[in-house]
Image: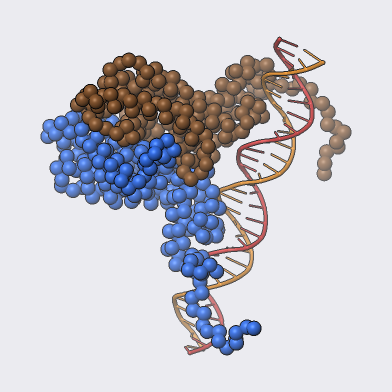
Chain colours: A brown, B blue, C red, D orange
Amino acid sequence: MKAPAATRRPVRSRRGTGQLGIHRLGTRGRPEESRAAILKAAVAEFAENGIAGARTDTIAREARVNKALLYYYFKDKDALYEAVLDHVFSGLRARVAPVLESKLPPRQKILEYLGAYFDYIAANPRFPRVVQAEWMQSGTKGSTHMRRVAQEYFRPIFGKVADVLREGIEAGEFRAVNPMDFVPSVVGAIIFYFSAAPLMKTLMKVDPLSEERIRERRAFVLDFVSAALFK
Amino acid sequence: MKAPAATRRPVRSRRGTGQLGIHRLGTRGRPEESRAAILKAAVAEFAENGIAGARTDTIAREARVNKALLYYYFKDKDALYEAVLDHVFSGLRARVAPVLESKLPPRQKILEYLGAYFDYIAANPRFPRVVQAEWMQSGTKGSTHMRRVAQEYFRPIFGKVADVLREGIEAGEFRAVNPMDFVPSVVGAIIFYFSAAPLMKTLMKVDPLSEERIRERRAFVLDFVSAALFK
DNA sequence: TTCATATAATTAACCAGTTAGTTAGATTCT
DNA sequence: AGAATCTAACTAACTGGTTAATTATATGAA
């Protein structure tokens, strides 16, 4: 049976979340905030569930915004993910590039680079997971924006690190390492700790993400790489 | 004209897809093979698309088996994934545990351990991705079998590596490292290279997975860790 | 040897729940 | 008024999982 069509009355304004108090972002909210809230919620959701596992409904709900607004700001789920990637990597580049462009001597430059990298990840421990979600897609599949991200962020940074290494090696300060080996090794060491943290937590007494532990970890990474790279 | 019916010789084994050569797995084929084919296809699919992104239809198709058969052998998608995890980790343990239980002196033992680990991953470069898919789920979510896998595989191996480290440190051969730092660092260095390989491929000339490159990479990892750990 | 029966292996067809994305409009700001 | 921001309600397509039937093999009684 269908309801009498005539009854369809103009809904009027029955707005508000239903919850009181909480001033929602929609309806006259600063659009910047809405967009930012969506992006932030997306980071969390993609990190937690991967690309395919992320739910746009959840992202919208978590951002306290109607799902359609999400599609107002972002073309589709994939574009949203792309925006998340850009957010993550532009942040990383912002911390790391200045160091690599500075005039420090090779030793310090490498150490500062590692430190900056580490600090950025430590401040955003969810990021490695967001990124790994992308790598998984990048096998045979097209993954167009994977390539873009690589070009835009990785290549220049990689190039600069390679330069520093060459410099240090030529100066006789570094052992002869291939950047293609060195970079993924140190990045892997930095990133892996954080992406494995939840798992580690289940089998150690220590909280792997406690402030104190992170300090210790940072010192270890710098020392470990120093010992491995410096002559 | 049709051949005289009398010639109808006992068909014997006409199992075959209709395609020649390829004896299909279905229709009363050796069940072992079917199960194995499903598992193999599942590894590939999970590695490529993550847990949520993996399609049971695709797995079945790729295994040349009806989807219902997949559910005949495995309770559900999650159980299948669990089986994949067991497959991967029991393989790893099989290579690594004997080394750690041997009577080698600490130095060699660590090197052999790293080598065995590396070789296993190198022989199965998809595995890291399968595992990372799981870690992503393990945030706030229950991820019951994550804990199980950690208990069953990681803890014992971790414990043994920690023992070797302690031994080496006490003997004055190793620098004093916390296993909680050392293990994720080296594992990260090993794994990361392979999970990042597709991405690296897009921005280097060299194929990061070529046999020659892998040999080089292996040597690097052993050397790098040696320099960082040994006094 | 032969035929009936049980059981393991396998499949085609289906379905109910989910989810990305849309539509048509409502508010608010300038 | 007009553009920008925002929403409730809706839908087309997909996907995990099920069901009922089918085929092949083994077993055992006659």
A38, A186: nearer the viewer: A186
User: Residue at 24% across / 25% down in the picture?
Assistant: A170
Q: Is residue A111 above or below residue B122?
A: above
Camera sees residue A182: yes
Left or right of residue B153: residue B174: left
Q: Position of residue A164 (x, y in %)?
A: 31, 24
Q: Position of residue A229 (x, y in %)?
A: 24, 28
User: Residue at 32% across / 32% down in the picture?
Assistant: A179
Q: Position of residue B127 (x, y in %)?
A: 39, 46
User: Residue at 37% across / 49% down in the picture?
Assistant: B124
What is the quadrant of the C terminus of chain B in the image?
top left
The quadrant in which residue A189 appears is: top left
Q: Position of residue C30 (x, y in %)?
A: 71, 10
What is the quadrant of the N terminus of chain B in the image?
bottom right
Number of marks:
0
Left or right of residue A30: residue A231: left
Q: Is residue A50 above or below residue C8?
A: above
Q: Is residue B13 above or below residue B125?
A: below
Left or right of residue A74: residue B85: left
Camera sees residue A210: no
User: Residue at 51% across / 46% down in the picture?
Assistant: B54
Q: Most extreme residue toward the right, as rendered?
A: A6
